[in-house]
Amino acid sequence: MKTTRLTTRMIAIVAVALFIWVSTPTMAQSGTEVLLLPYKGDRVVLKISNPEQDEPLALTIKDAEGSILFQEQIEEEKFEQVFDFSVAGKGAYIFDLNHGGDLVRSTLSVDENGLITGNFADTGGSAYAFSKDIRTSDNKLMVRFKNKLEESMTLKIYDSKDDTLLYEEEGISAAEFAKSYDFSKLKKGVYSISLSGNTYSYYYDVDLR
């Protein structure tokens, strides 16, 4: 099994880690299953099952300041990798698994006693921290999303030809959002939609023919 050592800040923690772990399988809407578990001392193992493989999964691990420590595109049906936090230094770390703009997020913290994490899965159903549904029909754009991240979103619509900003809506803090936009008076061409927060971003293009 492959092991990746994370070396940010290079501060060693105690050799024998204390795990306080509440982690259950996360079943994403696509059928993807994610499991994060303690593994031998100062290590964790991430297991991902992606039976549909309709598009690659993007795995990103960041520290609390947002610095990226690890990135990988996962195309395999089964993925299993060990991450070594023995020299990572104490603090909070974020595991993001992005599946076409739908985000599964787990946070892990390291302190002088070892590794501690909260509840990785939402046992009430979908475990996505952010999920979206953006589609067009009859020259109308429909944007829906569910937001469990503790951050507000900004929605922008651009003309892709010259990056002209046509519409902007800031501070969207609702847990569920749904709104339609009439594109019938726009010229033919490609238009870009962006959704972004402090730690999340997604881009979608609409081709009006």
Image (cartoon, helix red, strand yellow):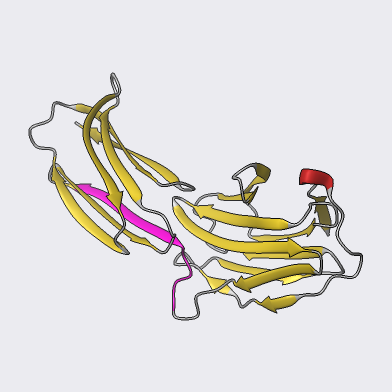
Q: Residue at x 76, y 45 (%)?
A: 8
**Residue farthest to the front?**
112
Q: Residue at x 84, y 50 (%)?
A: 11
Res. 9 image quadrant: top right
Q: Residue at x 64, y 42 (%)?
A: 68
Rendering coords of residue 150 (x, y %): 43, 59
Left or right of 48, for residue 133: left
Left or right of 39, for residue 145: left
Q: Residue at x 51, y 50 (%)?
A: 55
Residue 151 on the magenta segment = no
**Residue farthest to the right?**
15
The magenta span reads 125-136
Kindly tell me whether residue 50 is visible in this rendering: no
Rendering coords of residue 174 (x, y %): 29, 61
Residue 134 on the magenta segment = yes
Split into 4 quadrants, where in the image is the C terminus?
top left
Rendering coords of residue 58 (x, y %): 57, 49
Res. 176 image quadrant: bottom left
- In the depicted view, which residue is nearer to us: 46 or 9? 9
Split into 4 quadrants, where in the image is the N terminus?
bottom right
Above or below residue 109? Residue 58 is above
Res. 119 image quadrant: bottom right
Above or below residue 131? Residue 75 is above
**Residue farthest to the left?**
185
Rendering coords of residue 197 (x, y %): 41, 47
- In the depicted view, which residue is nearer to us: 113 or 39? 113
